[in-house]
Amino acid sequence: MSPKKNSASKARSKKAKAPAKKSGKATKIPSHGKSTSAPTTTPSSNGSAQGLRVRMFRVGFGDFFLLTVPTANGPSEHVLIDCGVHAQDLGSIRDAVDQMAKDCGSKLTLVVMTHRHADHISGFATCSDVFSGFTVERVWMPWFEDPKNDTAMAFQASLTAMANDLSMRFAARGDDSSLMLKDMVDNITGGPAAAGGSKNQKALDVLHNGFKNKADHDYYKAGDQPVLPKSLSDAGLSAQILGPPIDPKLISQMTKVSQQYLSEQIETDDEGVRPFPKAFWTDRNGYPSDAFRIYDDQTITRLIDGAQPNLLAARAKAADNTLNNQSLVVLFSFRGKNLLFAGDAQWGNWENFLYGGAYGTPGHTELTENAKSILGKIDFYKVGHHGSANATPKDAVAAMRLGCVGMCSTQIHAYNQVPREPLLDALRGRMEGQLARSDQVATQTSKAEKTAGELPDQFKIPATGELFIDYEFK
């Protein structure tokens, strides 16, 4: 997707607007009926989930979520899911990290890194000095980050090398379209770091060795049984790993247009398309001389080339999407409440979870019973890929429990038609209006986004009206 401004109409703004007005005060969350946890994730405790909280920080186009888990005796435990920003950086990520450090006493029981895009990990590099004072018990990453997995390491090295090569090519070209594509590639590398390597590599170094203590690291794929810190298990939290898949064919499948909530524009799957077969190709000698009265042949060739799919752009998009599909997808369960964090998972990651394999192949044409059970009982969904069209398939939305709650970390004017309004409208319908966007709260330098509508009363913002949005379970 190209970083092109997204023009939201007044009608769209009214459609996005929730009837309730935002407030810094706690409000009563409406009851949606009894909710039971998904199979294999039901905790032993049947008590209330009161005190369980999801906090979404506003940093621009990026994910930064903090899950706070109450305990029976003692302070709450904290789980960090991603910490990064890339496009439309609002300059608030240091304030957000400082706020988190204050709230959790610089102690994180678990850190979940969904994938290595800058908009999910750059905060670890930018705020490495703050994180160096954090005590972290465990860090979860997708299997693609496992240093003992030769396949994973070769894949990441190849991807990084290609990204660096593309970055240099775009810089050499220097036109506006190349700058846009370079922005996409920089999300893979994080851009150049001050002292060699890349910013993303610096962030990965912090995640591996940059905390106050030496944390334990785990690398997971779909179906693995995760190891939770004992304090979280004792509190009643459990987890299930739903992605990424191990099959490279699934990882490479980025888009399924029939599963997207599209707007008025026509789109195609991510496959190269040539408009005409070679039989119809020719040079200037195939045309009469008066065909070039307005433009000469070189100008026409240049105009046509500029309108064709760009090979470098295709490579950049493929690399960008491949990282999205590496996303660690986690279902947390706590005292009967189920929370799904999908990172930036795209079609191949989703189809492995939804259908148990490549969609359309024998035995993989309908939602599995496990997928239907999980989605039919979720209470919270972190909207995938910032509300992009190539995440959150239609089948997933249709299977979600009516009245569940959602949070979407996003920012307009970062990428074209992100967040995708038809998708958000479908989610609002399924969630009975209980969907919050990160741009519905202000920062010190940015106002709340008017076109996002008003924040539903089920969510809370701090008394200052800035920096983060909370959802607390009752």
Image: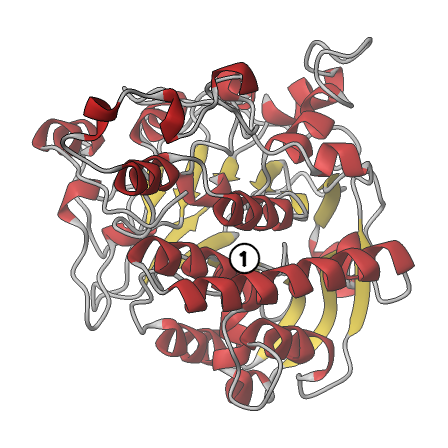
Q: Is residue 37 visible?
A: no
- The image shows residue 308, relative to residue 385, as above or below, that is above
Q: Camera-side residue: 132 or 103?
A: 132
Q: Quadrant of residue 45?
A: top right
Identify the element where label 1 is drawn.
Answer: strand
**Up/down of 170 relative to 352, above or below:** below
**Residue 77, x across and y down, in percent:** 61, 66
Tell me the quarter of the picture where residue 108 sits: bottom right
Residue 350 horizontal/vertical position (percent): 64, 30
Crowdedness near tag 1: few (<14), some (14–19) or many (≥20) residues, C-alpha within 10 Å: many
Expressed as whole percent of the image width and height from the top left, the position of residue 194 reads: 51, 88
**Residue that lies at the very extreme toward the left in this rendered image:** 10
Q: Which residue sits at x=27%, y=64%?
A: 462
Q: Amino acid at mark 1?
A: Leu
Left or right: residue 17 versus residue 170 is left
Position of residue 129 measured from the top left corner of the image (x, y, whole percent): 53, 90
Q: In this rendered view, identify the residue nearer to me: 464 or 115.
A: 115
Q: Is residue 182 left or right of residue 323?
A: left
Residue 173 in view of the camera? yes
Give the residue displayed 34% in from the left and 27% down from the top. 428
Tell me if residue 48 comes above or below residue 94 in the rendering: above
The residue closer to the viewer here, 379 or 138, is 138
Residue on which disc 1 sits: 67
From what the image shows, is residue 418 above or below residue 181? above
Look at 19% across and 65% down and name the residue there: 446
Q: How many marks?
A: 1
Q: Residue sitting at 55 percent across and 76 percent down?
A: 199
Q: Which quarter shows the N terminus?
A: top left
- In front of the other: 446 or 474: 446
